[in-house]
Image (spheres, helix red, strand yellow):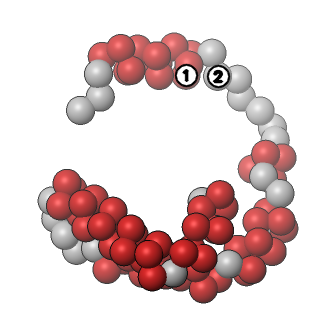
């Protein structure tokens, strides 16, 4: 549950938000992202498989616990997955 103070901070931030004509590419170098994502394809696929496998679990807390446990297990098995975390 989101606290009232958090909601107020968000609303304050939103009121001060300025429109821009810039696209997402102004903020993100997508060519660089694609290049790096390709470099870590195996690791990203492993992480993605954990999320996809748990999509059908209806209870959010159970789904989150499963994903966390499976991710920690994956890190033990394949420590190389940690290299791609900054991309996420």
Quadrant location, the C terminus: bottom right
Task: Say which quarter of the image contains residue 20.
Answer: top right
The single residue placed furthest to the front in the displayed view is 76
Q: Is residue 48 visible?
A: no
Q: Residues within 10 Å of mark 1 (few under 14, many from 20)?
A: few
The single residue placed furthest to the bottom in the displayed view is 42
Q: Residues within 10 Å of mark 2 (few under 14, many from 20)?
A: few
- With 32 as the anchor, is 9 left or right in this view? left
- Residue ID at (35%, 14%): 5
Of residue 78 and residue 53, the one placed in the foreground of this image is 78
- Residue ID at (23%, 32%): 1
- With 12 as the anchor, is 39 left or right in this view? right
Of residue 40 and residue 74, the one placed in the foreground of this image is 74
Q: Which residue is mark 1?
A: 14
Q: Is residue 41 visible?
A: yes
- Residue ID at (17%, 61%): 62
Where 7 falls versus 43 (above or below)? Answer: above
Q: Which residue is mark 2?
A: 17
- With 55 as the anchor, is 77 left or right in this view? right
Of residue 75 and residue 58, the one placed in the foreground of this image is 75
In terms of secondary structure, where does tag 1 sit? Answer: helix
- Residue ID at (81%, 74%): 35
């Amino acid at each position: 549950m989101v606290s009232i103070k958090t909601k107020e901070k968000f609303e304050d931030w939103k009121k001060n938000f300025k429109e821009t004509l810039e696209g997402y590419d102004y903020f993100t170098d997508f060519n660089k992202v694609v290049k790096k994502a390709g470099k870590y394809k195996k690791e990203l696929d492993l992480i993605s498989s954990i999320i996809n496998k748990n999509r059908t679990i209806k209870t959010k807390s159970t789904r989150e616990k499963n994903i966390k446990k499976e991710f920690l297990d994956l890190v033990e098995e394949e420590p190389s997955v940690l290299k791609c975390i900054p991309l996420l």
